[in-house]
Image (tube, rainbow, N blue to C red):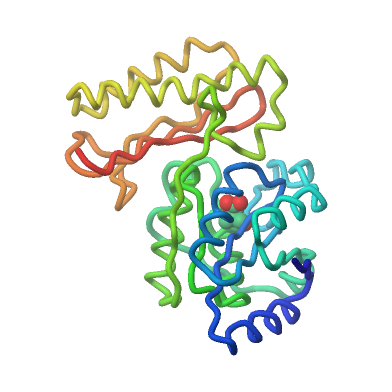
Amino acid sequence: MKIVQTVEEVRTQVKEWKMKGLTVGLVPTMGYLHEGHKSLIDRAVEENDKVVVSVFVNPMQFGPTEDLASYPRDLDRDAALCEAAGADLIFHPEPEEMYKPDFSSFIDMNTLTGGLCGKSRPIHFRGVCTVVGKLFHIVGPDRAYFGQKDAQQLAVIRHMVKDLNFDLEVVGCPIVREPDGLAKSSRNTYLNPTERQAALILYKSLEKGKELIESGERQASVIREAMIRMIETEPLAKIDYVELVDWDTLEPVALIEGPVLNAIAVYIGTTRLIDNHIYERI
Ligand code: PAF
């Protein structure tokens, strides 16, 4: 497995693979890889001849008061995980390689990005779309892999690919959880042991929502309020949002009639965690 830092090196390698008729899968990441990322790489290795993992903490998707500086980084550990999983290339650019000093073009989306995480992170999806669009152009993959834990991101990227005619398939992969239910996330490393325990309230509240839906409840407000009440029993938790939205439009629903995304964002201490459940069949 090779680790490269420049766009030119990626293009040269991918061109060589394409000339041999090989297919290429891309797993975009911000590094500090965990089992969730590994599941994306495993799937990419299964479905493609060659796999590129990008490891880039994208400054453009962090707000001024967010955790860009403290975001965990460990390239050696990431490289070991990628190699063991069977990836072929890591693209690890410096910010200056991705954004030249006169950089001034962005991918901005008018729909899907205003609610949920977009409400408290207004510039986040512009940064995500811009960097993912660039990665798609740089690598030119046949397939790109994203986790369903960032469900809004997955919906936004699918929409961007359709709108802008990127010639690739977006593959969404299931959430990977710790044995006690906490969704795997690089940000879990910020939690101290008490907060780690408190963070279970996210999963428990989603399970509560699931239980209500499976028992026939269709009023989104009833489900939402039950989940909020449950989260509020945890003193270290502060709710950013609890929303039931249409899985296609990401608009809030009053009645659950079709595929719905039950998405939550909760601060545990100062760490903001997200999690969700998608009900495809109602
Ligand atoms: O999900 C992430 O880690 C990031 O948002 C992504 C898709 C790698 C873009 O920086």
Which of 72 and 120 lies nearest the eye of the viewer? 72
**Residue 246 position in % (x across, y down):** 28, 45
Question: Which quadrant of the structure image shows residue 204?
Answer: top left
Residue at screen point 50% across, 49% down: 147
Question: Which quadrant of the structure image shows residue 244?
Answer: top left
92 left or right of 204 in image: right
Residue 34 vertical position relative to residue 166 in the rendered view, above or below:
above
**Residue 207 position in % (x across, y down):** 38, 23
Name the image quarter holding the N terminus: bottom right
Name the image quarter holding the C terminus: top left
28 left or right of 72 in image: left
Q: Image quadrant of ligand 1?
A: bottom right
Question: Which quadrant of the structure image shows residue 222?
Answer: top left
Residue at screen point 58% across, 60% down: 27
Which residue is the extreme one toward the bottom? 19
**Residue 123 position in % (x across, y down):** 57, 53
Residue at screen point 41% across, 30% down: 242
